[in-house]
Amino acid sequence: MSHALWGGRFEGGLAAEMVPLNRSLDVDWRLWRHDVRGSRAWARGLERAGVLSPDEAAAIDGGLAQVAERLEALPGPAGLPDEDIHTVVERLLTEIVGSVGGKLHTGRSRNDQVATDFRMWGMEAVAGLREQVAALVDALAAKARTETDAIMPAYTHLQQAQPVPVAHWLLSRAWPLVRDLKQFGAVADECRVLPLGSGAVAGCPFDVDRDALAAELGFSHVSENSIDAVSDRDWAAKLVFAAALTGVHLSQLAEDLVVFSSAEFGFVRIGGGFATGSSLMPQKRNPDVAELVRGKAGRLVGNVAGMLAVLKGLPTGYNRDLQEDKEAVFDSVDTLAVVLPAMTGAVAKLEVVRERVAGARQAGLCATDLAEHLVRRGVPFRESHHAVGALVRIAEASGRELTDLTVDEMRSAHPAFGDDAAAVLAPAASVESRALRGGTATAAVEVQLQALAEALREA
Ligand code: ARG
């Protein structure tokens, strides 16, 4: 027999067709620990407010401890008749302690209760994700430290642009994750506002100390408006957005790995355990880890649209639509919790194939440096850019590379080329010449690594 919490004014039970639509237990089951913890705190709050006698409060508290034991022993919600996790907890409590269990819900509604449970869950989930993101940043930094002297082409428009250390590329994929860490931190801060004590929508008439409740349950503030408190899911929307943006960042790194591990590039080799073979083609080594991560970003992005669509157009106060808030959040957190460790492992095991990276560099990769050589000799950049463009044309027309041209040929395009002009075409020289903060020089990359470690500590 189900134990609906709202049966008094109704004659019959819920229509059979309504039961599956109404039921959220299979989704909110994972909130049971938070529901029990919040309920125990609420019972103590009611006691301090003089609503429960010490004996009643002790009976309820002991009963809730037993409820937790029973729920711990269950494999899941399958077979339970209840509509949601709050109903399960109260039904079991009443079975265990009798009618005094019915006093627990005094001054409380499932509206402020679920908002509280969900935020408690959110705080824990975000803490877990932050650790996983930090581990990936660490893995990228560790890999970068081993690749400071390998020089690859940096790309714009996926065309070779200028030389950079492989470390610089790896670190370019770490910084977005540091921003994600900060964003998750902001979400966790927003989570720490306690709705409990807001009742269904208009607050609680009993003198419960909300600040004490907040402190006991790990919240830093109490909500300031009971209507807002029961309907605010901004933190949840921001969590799914933060998760989606992290997913996008992971997807971009994944795309790099797919492209760079292809035969045509061959810059990296996906480590054993993270690549898979083909059931048909014996020679295949597929970058499945990267493709799966890239694919998972799709659902993370979809969850943002789903969440915002649920919230859009809700009228004032609590609305049952809000029951739909949890699936998106749980799915985004679960998805990232699977994706992040896999990507961290793949990065740790990633092999950079230095010969391929070096061999791929086009001779014209340092054409910009040649133009800058003229700039150092007083030529306006527009003019030097034009002169080097002419040299590229001369080289192409004679089937040679920029690096094959003689100084005299260079001077035919512009008289200001110095005897040492050819030296700037060496990728290592180009890399070292960009020594400003954020640049490619060995010393700048060293500073960057330190800055990343510092940012990680701060985040
Ligand atoms: N299962 C509901 C949810 O997840 C709990 C709140 C229900 N409130 C109500 N008045 N029916 O949001």
Image: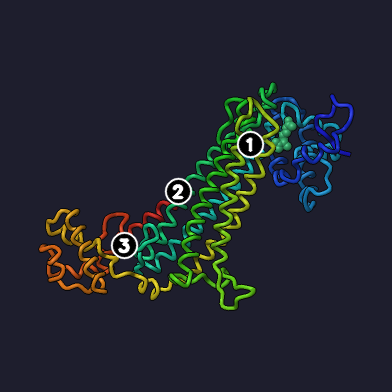
Residue sitting farthest toward the left: 415
Indicate which disc, 2 or 1, sits on the residue closer to the N terminus. Answer: 2
* Disc 2 CB within 8 Å of nearest ligand 1 atom: no
Q: Nearer the viewer, residue 181 or 167?
A: 167
Q: Residues within 10 Å of mark 1 (few under 14, many from 20)?
A: some
Which secondary structure lies at badge 2? helix
Q: Which residue appears at 68% of the width and 39% of the height?
A: 324
Which secondary structure lies at badge 1? helix
Q: Residue 238, percent across and down?
A: 54, 40
Residue type for callout 1: Val
* Disc 3 CB within 8 Å of nearest ligand 1 atom: no
Q: Residue 206, percent across and down?
A: 70, 23
Q: Are marks 2 and 3 in contact (CB under 8 Å)?
A: no
Where 48 falls versus 180 (above or below)?
A: above
Residue sitting farthest toward the bottom: 282
Which residue has dot 3 on it? Answer: 162
Residue type for callout 2: Arg
In the figure, residue 161 lies in which quadrant? bottom left
Which residue has dot 1 on it? Answer: 310
Q: Nearer the viewer, residue 19 or 282?
A: 282
Indicate which disc, 2 or 3, sits on the residue closer to the N terminus. Answer: 3
Q: How far, Cα to Cα, is label 2 from label 3?
A: 26 Å
Q: Is residue 201 left or right of residue 153?
A: right
Which secondary structure lies at badge 3? strand
Q: Can residue 45 be seen in the rendering of this structure? A: yes
Q: Residues within 10 Å of mark 2 (few under 14, many from 20)?
A: some
Which residue has dot 2 on it? Answer: 179
